[in-house]
Amino acid sequence: MNQIITIGREFGSGGRELGKRLSELLGYAYYDREIVRAIARRSELAESYVDMVLENGVCAYYPITVANTFSAAYDPLSMMSGSIYAAQTEILKELAGKSDCVIVGRCADHVLADFHPLRIFVYASRERKLARCREKDQGEWVSDRELERRIRAVDKARSQYYRACTGCVWGDKANYDLCINTSGVELKPLAAALAALARSVRGSEG
Amino acid sequence: MNQIITIGREFGSGGRELGKRLSELLGYAYYDREIVRAIARRSELAESYVDMVLENGVCAYYPITVANTFSAAYDPLSMMSGSIYAAQTEILKELAGKSDCVIVGRCADHVLADFHPLRIFVYASRERKLARCREKDQGEWVSDRELERRIRAVDKARSQYYRACTGCVWGDKANYDLCINTSGVELKPLAAALAALARSVRGSEG
């Protein structure tokens, strides 16, 4: 069976970079934005709309059958059965069936449970997340307070989305195989060690 | 600076075995029961009593100065300032100053914060913990329900002890660098991967 590595991550924790590095080291496919694009193509919805629903956790349900009418019901349950989530599930399973891969976000740990993924959650201290966001940000200047508010808002949305889709608590270690605090470490050597771990876990399964 | 690896663990998760293997692979000292013995020697208390206070989280304070009088105050705060905890703190710092080491339990993650330990927490699913306890147990037969009750009791005591000593929540991922779910993996290859991770973290600090 293909080895699937799913990465949940707090905003600013470096989870995405870690996932990318990990996929490169292992020679695995890497999926993140690609999934949003694929859903948009398949559902004939704007990528930005799919993104809003999936990434920002807006619990809206947009029926593909009424492609020209904006009909959003703000109800987590309706979203659960919604076409966007269904399309995402379908695409995630196709990708997981195709080859070894690393998938960031998208509740992939839950959606792909049958593939027995290595489920990683990446988090960091408040200070580290602020610092990382500052490093990455090339745009407008914002205060620490405002930046922290934005980080918290993204994480809250991810948490709500995860809860709505899986019924589980986002970031609760019981739902993951490995939770990694990136506060005090460099991502490059950490990714190398994780690659070794992924290989060994795969080895011990065989 | 010496590399200190601290391991907190749920009962039946295999944390102790993982710590032992890790120390062997890295060539580090390993401390677990040794600490209880050292405290008992230094405080002239019975090893079993020290064990009860430290391991089972009984929040009792037994003043060394009244060595022949049993005077236990069931108060977490009094324990915090108690001689046993003080002796443990002293011994842990001595050990950490002496050489690289792996320390299981004893709130070492908190006590040795100045040594910037790699703080690991090991946990597992209910089913895995039950199975592991069955594998280890050579004594009386007990029902799953009774075994689970015992596992829960030990974990509750550890949690209370950790809370009393550190003011933090035991097993809360924010307090650790790495949380590892041992439910689906073999400990031997996992320990090898963790050794690689410990080396790489040390490397990235240097």
Image: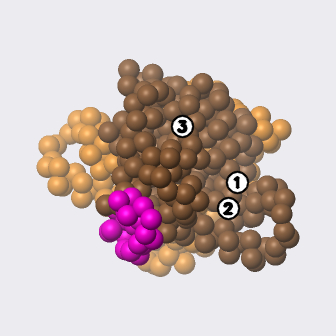
Chain colours: A orange, B brown
Residue type at mark 3?
Answer: Val
The answer as to whether the residues below labels 2 and 3 share one chain is yes
Q: Identify the residue shown where x is 59% and y is 26%.
A: B26
Percent across and percent down for residue B140 are 84, 68
Is residue B204 shown left or right of residue B34? Answer: left
Magenta segment boundaries in residue numbering: B61-80
**Residue that carries the numbered disc 2 in the rendered image:** B125
Residue type at mark 2?
Answer: Ser
Work out which quarter of the rendered image holds the N terminus of chain B and state it: top left
Residue type at mark 1?
Answer: Ser
**Residue that carries the numbered disc 1 in the rendered image:** B183
Disc 2: CA contacts within 10 A as few (<14), some (14-19) or many (>=20): some
Q: Identify the residue shown where x is 62% and y is 71%.
A: B152
Q: How would you classify the magenta stretch by its main secondary structure?
A: loop
The answer as to whether the residues below labels 3 and 1 share one chain is yes
Work out which quarter of the rendered image holds the C terminus of chain B and state it: top left
Q: Earlier in the sequence, mark 2 or mark 3?
A: 3
Helix, strand or loop for disc 3: strand
Cα separation between marks 3 and 1: 22 Å
Is residue A48 positioned above or below B49 on the image?
above
| Chain identifier of the residue bearing label 2 in the image | B
| Chain identifier of the residue bearing label 1 in the image | B
Percent across and percent down for residue B71 are 41, 72
Percent across and percent down for residue B90 are 37, 44
Q: Nearer the viewer, mark 2 or mark 3?
A: 3
